[in-house]
Image (spheres, helix red, strand yellow):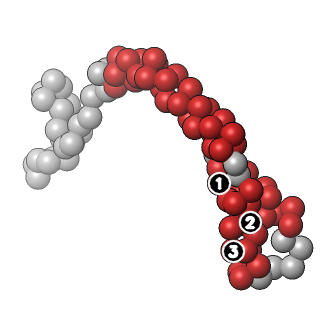
Amino acid sequence: MAWSDIKQYVGSKNVKWSVTKCIEIIQEKVLLLGAWDWLKLCKKVNDIEEQYAKSDHVADLVTETFIISVDDSDDDDATSTDDRSSPET
């Protein structure tokens, strides 16, 4: 989130592309960010993390229903007519 603010600031100031000038503007913006700005950013991140923690159980419920097959065999379907592992056809 801080990087978003910094990129916006750099974009508004950097009229002539220069890596050196870009670095100077980034440093300028970082120095302009005061304690109140950092406090707001940290609070916002904390709020987002709390929301993730509240909904984390949903991801667990959904992922428990996934079945991942690592081979082509289908042990449940022994009468399959498309048996590619058998050389006899």
**First in residue order: circle 3 vs circle 2:** 3
Is 17 positioned to the left or the right of 2 in the image?
right
Label 3 or label 2, whichever lies nearer to me, is 2
Residue 17 coordinates in the image, percent (x, y)? 81, 79
**First in residue order: circle 2 vs circle 1:** 1
Q: Nearer the viewer, residue 76 or 32?
A: 32
Image quarter for residue 25? Answer: bottom right
Distance from disc 2 to disc 1, alpha carbons, whole Å, reads 13 Å
Question: Badge 2, how many Cα within 10 Å: few under 14, some, many 20+?
Answer: some
**Amino acid of disc 3:** Ile
Vertical position of residue 77 compared to residue 83: above or below: above
Residue of label 2: 28
- Residue ID at (56%, 26%): 47
Q: Secondary structure at mark 3?
A: helix
Q: How many marks?
A: 3
Is 53 positioned to the left or the right of 41 in the image?
left
Residue 59 visible within the image: yes
**Amino acid of disc 2:** Glu
**Amino acid of disc 1:** Trp
**First in residue order: circle 3 vs circle 1:** 1
Residue of label 3: 23
- Residue ID at (89%, 73%): 15
Residue of label 1: 3
Distance from disc 3 to disc 1, alpha carbons, whole Å, reads 13 Å
Q: Nearer the viewer, residue 49 or 73?
A: 49
Q: Nearer the viewer, residue 33 or 88?
A: 33
Q: Nearer the viewer, residue 79 or 30?
A: 30
Q: Which mark is residue 44?
A: none
Residue 51 coordinates in the image, percent (x, y)? 52, 22
Q: Are marks 2 and 1 in contact (CB under 8 Å)?
A: no
Vertical position of residue 46 compared to residue 41: above or below: above
Residue 4 visible within the image: no
